Image (cartoon, rainbow, N blue to C red):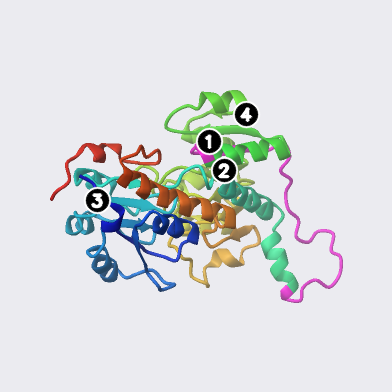
Amino acid sequence: MRRNPGEVNVLVTRKFPERGMELLKDQGFGVSVWPGEEPMTDKEFLKEAKLSTALFCTLSEKVDRSFLEECSHIDIISQFGVGYDNIDVEAAGELGIPVCNTPDVLSDATADVAFALMINVSRKMFWLHKSIARGEWKYFRPGYGLGIELRGKTLGIFGLGRIGTEMAKRCKGAFGMEVIYHNRNRKAEAEKELGARYVSFEELLLHSDILSVHANLTNETEGIFDMNAFRKMKSSAIFINTARGLMHDENDLATALQKGIIWGAGLDVTNPEPMESDNPLLEMENVAVLPHIGSATTETRNRMSELAASAIVSYYRGERIDNIVNPQALDIKKRE
């Protein structure tokens, strides 16, 4: 039997937007918000979780098998984010702990960032902006800071899910791009709507003028964009990653850019993350790097907070949860 809201203490691991907190409090849940700006240490997280019955967390929290076995009393984990590679979902399922995320609501915001990175890289905007601060804008130089045009180019999407589809719509609508993609499964609707063409991973590398990464991080995708992959890409290609930094090898990417193996790169995610301030990528002409802000709009973050809170409310009401990533957990009897 599920607990009543008054018996539940929800551990909220960061200062998330108040919309979600207000929803939980209005429904009678106890809410404990970690007061610090920085993430909890693993030790602090474990200590707080042992005093809680539900988790409202994000990617910075390590929810591995060891943690879950020590906190098997947890009823539900609701993740503030679409990705959940910080959580051992298999272990959670074995313990009967449902894991929820916040899909759909951040697709537009993240696609906007991927699109913006592509434009900024193609025109060297970040580097040229910094050149003004360096006092280098003295007079007109016809051959200085030249970028490349995007109209009519081929967009390659690695992972044509919700965000990848929104990126493809923007590129096709704004620049008339041809869209090719590689996915685990073919997307008939996208093929019909966008004229997208399914290709092998090898073909994606060979034919993309802009290669934009939107896949989930898995054992198969981790490190997939290494020197071997970059060498197969066009020397004029732009690499965009707004998914997970662990999917590209950052040293290989820097070398590929320095040697002209590919033309440019735009990153909202890095490897490691956060990026060090002396990373050579930050000083390259054809590179734009952002601090993982794909979902960083007021509207999107509010919706994410509401969705993560709503999953907890629905669970304790015994209602259907649409955004659960391991539904089999609901069928497993929890330990007393």
N-term-proximal mark, 4 vs 1? 4
Q: CA distance from mark 2 to mark 3?
A: 48 Å
Q: What residue is pinned by disc 4?
A: 194
N-term-proximal mark, 3 vs 1? 3
N-term-proximal mark, 4 vs 2? 4
Q: What residue is pinned by disc 3?
A: 3
- Neighbor class of circle 4 (other Cα within 10 Å; few <14, some 14-19, many 20+) is some
Residue 149, given in percent of the width and then of the height, sits at 74, 45
Can residue 8 be seen?
Answer: no
Is label 4 in a helix, a strand or a loop? helix
Residue at (54%, 44%) from the top-left corner? 107
Indicate whether residue 166 is drawn in magenta: no
Q: What residue is pinned by disc 2?
A: 211
Please indicate whether residue 42 sits to the left or right of residue 117 in the image.
left
Query: What's under tag 2, amino acid-wise?
Result: Leu
> Are circles 1 and 2 on residues that touch, CB within 8 Å?
yes
Residue 271 higher or lower than 336, as above or below: below
- Name the residue nearer the viewer: 154 or 61: 61
Is label 1 in a helix, a strand or a loop? helix
Q: CA distance from mark 3 to mark 1?
A: 50 Å
Q: CA distance from mark 3 to mark 4?
A: 47 Å
Residue 259, given in percent of the width and then of the height, sits at 57, 56
